[in-house]
Image (spheres, helix red, strand yellow):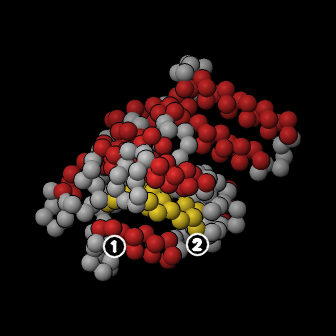
Amino acid sequence: SRGIAVLRVDDRAVGNSKGLETLKTSTSADFADDVRAQVEYLRSRRDIDRGRIALVGHSEGGIIAPMVAASDPRIGAIVLMAGTAKRGDEIIAYQVDQGLESDPTLTEEQRAKGRAEQKEAMRKAIEDDPSAPETLRIPWMRYFLTYDPLPTIRKVRQPVLILQGEFDRQVTADQAGMLAKAARESGNHDVTERVFPGLNHLFLPSKTGAFSEYSSLSTNVIPDDVIKQLTDWLVLKLKAAK
């Protein structure tokens, strides 16, 4: 309705998408290659203006979009929804801490022990220690634990829109400002950021933003002001038909 064609795809190995045989060894960098293939598909279509293609990524997609834009100057713009600005090990440590703090049955000593155990497990995973938990040793997780998004966002020269929920307890709201600051300091003068009050990681209304709240949320519909911010910005930057 805003004059923007939208391509939405199933992830690698989901639905009719291929790649099941490589999924166990794939990382976010591999998924970035998937996005590059999707962009090339769009560029092959006569009904798509190849000079006005934008990427909108949520969560891990907010990590991947800058990867693709930094390597492809023909990308018109990117939107990062709850994208990370910190290394993965910091993200996981925060999420584990949130889980420990929200458990009223734990003592402070037990919480401290849990944090220490998680920190040690991540150290072992990063060093590829065979004694690390298997869930942390898979290629995707090992890549995520050490990936720093800031050097990549500093290479992006296209317009950037950064959206975040105030109550996000998976990717904290302060990371929107970190991304914007890094992009601007590197010379990108077209960076917009907005944090939406009362929304969680899924951009849904929430009381606390905790993961445990997801199953009891009152709606699964993203608020109109989020969609309006997103589409207004894309119309402006891509000069789409209104």
Measured as percent of width and height from the top left, residue 124 is found at 60, 23
The answer for how far apart the CA atoms under marks 1 and 2 are is 27 Å
| Mark 1 Cα shell of 10 Å, populated few (<14), some (14-19), many (≥20) | some
Most foreground residue, 62 or 232: 232
* Residue 22 location, quadrant: top left
Which element carries disc 2, helix, strand or loop?
Answer: loop
Q: Is residue 41 left or right of residue 113?
A: left
Q: Is residue 165 left or right of residue 81?
A: right
Most foreground residue, 175 or 118: 175
Q: Is residue 75 left or right of residue 134?
A: left
Report the residue marked by disc 1.
235
Measured as percent of width and height from the top left, residue 40 is found at 21, 51
| Residue at x 67% of width, y 26% of height | 120
| Mark 2 Cα shell of 10 Å, populated few (<14), some (14-19), many (≥20) | few
Vertical relation: 192 (above or below) 36: below
Report the residue marked by disc 2.
219
- Mark 1 or mark 2, whichever is nearer to me: 1
Measured as percent of width and height from the top left, residue 169 is found at 64, 54
Which element carries disc 1, helix, strand or loop?
Answer: helix
Q: Which mark is residue 100?
A: none
